[in-house]
Amino acid sequence: MSDEKLLRLLRRDLASIRLAATSLEKSLAKCAKLTPAPPQSFEDEETFDALTSRFARTADILTQKVLKTTVLLLREDAPTFIDRMNLCEKLGMIPSAEELIAIRDLRNMIAHEYATENLLELYADTVSASPALLTAVSAATSFIKDRFT
């Protein structure tokens, strides 16, 4: 894929990550006023469900689109997710590969969690991990802006 095409993809993905991060921030602020412990109202549950969905979307856009495309543009070799996160940390694109790997694991749990007894823990973990995800988004977008614009 040409650099021109990759830059177009990166611009599109940056617009997507800005929207996703903004939605995640709003959901996080709303959830900060709630407690993910029983008893919960249906409305509270919907609020936490929205947070987990927005968290997963933001994590996907960052790790599977923005960072992946940036690594391709830099012509670096990082074939696996862990390799890519370690490279991104080394280059200063993200603060911590370990945090992004944990965020990816949480994203996978969100995508595959069907047992209601684990939902409260999942909500609490998402609230806890959201600031690190938002920090990583900010760091990556700053890196890209400095490097490619």
Image (cartoon, helix red, strand yellow):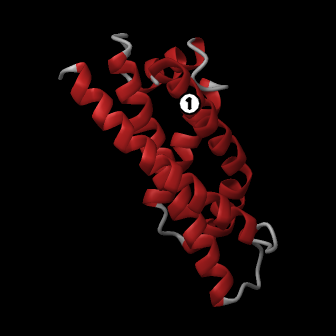
Q: Is residue 135 visible?
A: yes
| 53 relative to 59, above or below | below
- Seen at 43% across and 59% down, the residue is 112
Numbered label tally: 1
- Seen at 69% across and 54% down, the residue is 125
Based on the displayed image, in which of its 4 quarters is residue 142 positioned? top right
Q: Residue furthest left?
A: 1
Residue marked by disc 1: 140
Return the x and y of residue 111 as percentages of the image width and height.
44, 58
Q: Is residue 79 visible?
A: no
- Which quadrant would the N terminus be assigned to in this image? top left
Of 57 and 42, nearer the camera is 57
Going by the image, does 8 lie left or right of 109?
left
Helix, strand or loop status at disc 1: helix
Based on the displayed image, in which of its 4 quarters is residue 12 positioned? top left
Of 147 and 126, nearer the camera is 147
Return the x and y of residue 51 as percentages of the image width and height.
60, 65
| 27 relative to 57, above or below | below
Going by the image, does 109 lie left or right of 99?
left
| 61 relative to 45, above or below | above
Three-letter code for the amino acid on which mark 1 is drawn: Ala
Return the x and y of residue 25 as percentages of the image width and height.
66, 58
Q: How many other residues sit within 10 Å of disc 1, few (<14), some (14-19) or many (≥20)?
A: many
- Seen at 50% across and 56% down, the residue is 19
| 144 relative to 128, above or below | above
- Seen at 58% across and 39% down, the residue is 137
Return the x and y of residue 10 as percentages of the image width and height.
36, 34
